[in-house]
Structures are given as structure tokens and as C-alpha cells.
Image: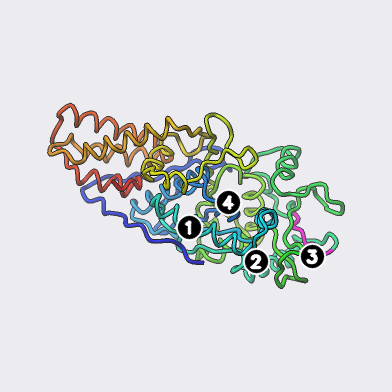
Amino acid sequence: MNSWAEVAIPPLGGNFDIPQLSLRDTARNGIYPLPKKDVYRIYVCGITPYDATHLGHAATYLTFDLINRYLRLQGSEVKFVQNITDIDDPLLERATRDGIDWKELAKSQIDLFRGDMVNLHVIPPDHYVGVVEAMGLVVDAIHKLESENSTYFVDEDLYFSVRTDEKFGSRSHFSQEKMIEIFSERGGDPNRLGKRDPLDALLWLSHRDGEPSWSGPHQDGRPGWHIECCAIALNYLDLDSDSSTSIDIQGGGSDLIFPHHEMSAAQGAILQGREFASHYVHSGMIGLDGVKMSKSLGNLVFVSRLIASGVDPMAIRWALMESHFSVDRSWSQALLEDAQTWILRLRDALSMMEVAPTHSVISEIIKAQAENIDTPQSLQVIKNWVNDCHKGSSGGNAGELSRAIDAILGLAL
Ligand code: ZN
């Protein structure tokens, strides 16, 4: 699958101390530094392409873009892979509802997503991989799980036995009852007769009438949701055999903590004989005017529609950075208007003949980002600088700051 256009990252220039990045890890329930490495491996779960990119998606991909930018700032190489769940129940259900071919629906929404990512200046993944094109890898991974005695059949459908991973549940921290409840809400089938544990996850669904199917580990069908990410991450991230974990960061929205990331991590642990990721990083959910944004409530705000209505994509970036990535946040028209005002004020300040000192401002932004990507603090530092410029402070270099906020925060002004 084609990724999207490369984003130019200007060199920082100057002499800046770049502290080690610390990030919140869901599994350890705290903020921990990433070990210093020359190469980092990041896997971020992509969209299921049955609807356009809404602000919740934008917030997630912005989070990992900022992490990516910081690690590059450290001088490290970042290997970054993202998937597209281009075959799954929601996609087939939406295509059937709307009377269109599921492949056409997926293609149109993937195209829209790419356009949104380009507009938002999100660094593209090195590999952008659809499940359909990775089917061979998924089948290979399932065979390996079978050889580790981690699978069993219910009728002709193949399941992953979650308890074969002794650390199952340790990354998401929910009770068995809570896990069952969430599993049921998010595509799981805890009540299916014949399962050994209600939480065991579908690996391969045998062919159903009217559904597309592929050649499988034993019979035609299609894969379960969680095995795809595990198989794609382990095959496309060029793993480091010396590391204690397969990858450095598994990322996505906080709605993926359970079951999706717990399941993929458990499967990855069995496949590789080591912990899947060193950091499990999750971005908070986006609400609208204080209400959870969801398809069922019909209150999704789509990035493409905002941009088509004339909203500056950099104002969307700014507005999303006004709150910390890890907390649930609310979107509002007032937030967007405030962001648009600040983008204009910042552009205005950057075009002044004399600007307030910039070197210390850049240092403060770097420091804020190093501490768990503290974007509210970074934006506050910029606001203070803009205000100082308007008060007549001088001695700075506008070009230097402009390049730095482009490189670090992705704000190309
Ligand atoms: Zn995933």
C-alpha cells in the first residue's frame, strides 16, 4: 500500500541540549524514559477504512508524529509502520448498508485519510500495510502460534488461547469481569459456546456465505482483528535480536488498550519469546462540547470537512496540542477559533523585523516535549514569546524559531 508524501523536516541548527525522551507507558502505569538507542521501532494501529478521518484519529496520529519528530531530533533513526484494517466486520457492514463494494469503500476512505495526513503534516510511515496484502504473514503467524500450542478450534474457527501468555492482562490492568465487558463491546465474542476462556480471541474465521475469503491456515476465511497488527509489526519493523522487546512503542488510541493491544502483545510475546513492546503508548479520546465523539451519536468532526470549509490545518494541529495527548479532551468551535487566532498572531510575530530572544524559547520547547510530549507547555512558551515580541522585546532570530517549531511541533507556518 502506498504511504503518503514525505514531510520536510527543517534542520534545527544552533546548539541545543536534547534530553532523553520520557513517555507514559500504559503497562507500567507511569512515565518512563525510552532507553537511548540509534534505532527505534514504532508500530501504530491504523484506521479501519469505512469512514473519514475524524478528530480522534487526527489526535492519535499527531501524538505519534510528535514522538517520531522528537526521536529524530535526538539523532536517532525511527522505523515506523502503520497498518490499515482493510478487511473487518465494520467495513463489510458499512459497505452492505450503503450498497457499495467493500473494496471501493476502503479505497475511497484510505485516499481521504492520506490527504488528511498530508494536510496535517504527519510524517508518513516507512511501511503502510493493508491486511489484505499481508495475508501470507498473518497465516504464517497463525501457524507459528499453533506450533506453540496457543490455538484451538471452535467448530471451524481458530482461536488464540490468551492464557498461554502468562503476562496476559498485565498491560491493560482490567479485572476479568471488566475485560469481558469491554471485549464484548469491541468486537469480541465472550459468550460463544466451546471457548476455553471467554477472552480467547479469534485468529481465523472460516468462510461465511456472502463474505470475501482468503486461503487460510486450514481453510478459506478471513483473519481476526488482533493477529494482523502483531504479524505486520513483527515482519515489517526489522527487529533487533539483541533487544529485550520486539519493538519500542506500540501505539494507538486509548480505546485500543483492551482488547486490541493486549491481544496483539500477547500473541507477539508467544511468537517472539519476549515482550512485544517496551512502551505501550495511548492517546486520549476526543469529545465534542463535552460529549464523547462517536459514530453512534453522529457527532464526529471530520478533518477533511474542516479543511474544505477553510480551516487552516495548522490550526487543527495547534488546537489538538492545547491539551496533553494522554488525557481525554473536548473539541469545540471556541477551541478551534482560539487556535486560529494564535496561528495568525504567531505568523505575525515571526514576520516582525525585531523579535524577542528565541534560543531559550527553543530550549524550553525541547525540554517540554522531552517530558512526555508536553504540548500544552510548549504552546504556552510560544504564546509568551509572541506576547514578548508585541511588547517590543528584541534580540531573537525569527527564522531559527520558525524552523524549530516546524521540526519539533510540525507547525509549518
Ligand atoms: Zn492494531
Residue 313 or 350: which is nearer the viewer? 313
Snapshot quadrant of residue 322 = top left
Residue 55 or 241: which is nearer the viewer? 55
Ligand 1 is located in which of the four quadrants? Answer: bottom right
Q: What range of the chain is rendered magenta?
A: 156-161
The residue under label 1 is 41
From the viewer's perspective, tell me whether residue 319 is left or right of residue 256: left
Res 30 label: none
Residue at 58% from the left image edge and 60% from the top image edge: 106
Residue at 37% from the left image edge and 35% from the top image edge: 339
First in sequence: mark 3 vs mark 2 = 2
Q: Height in image: 247 above or below 374? A: below
Res 51 label: 4
Mark 1 in CB contact with mark 2 (< 8 angstroms) = no
Separation of marks 2 and 4 at Cα, in angstroms: 25 Å
Depth check, mark 3 against mark 1: the one in front is 3
Res 138 label: 2
Q: Is residue 24 magenta?
A: no
Dot 3: within a 10 Å radius of its alpha carbon, few (fewer than 14), some, or many (20 or more) residues? few
Snapshot quadrant of residue 28 = top right
Depth check, mark 1 against mark 2: the one in front is 2
Separation of marks 3 and 1 at Cα, in angstroms: 39 Å
Dot 4: within a 10 Å radius of its alpha carbon, few (fewer than 14), some, or many (20 or more) residues? some
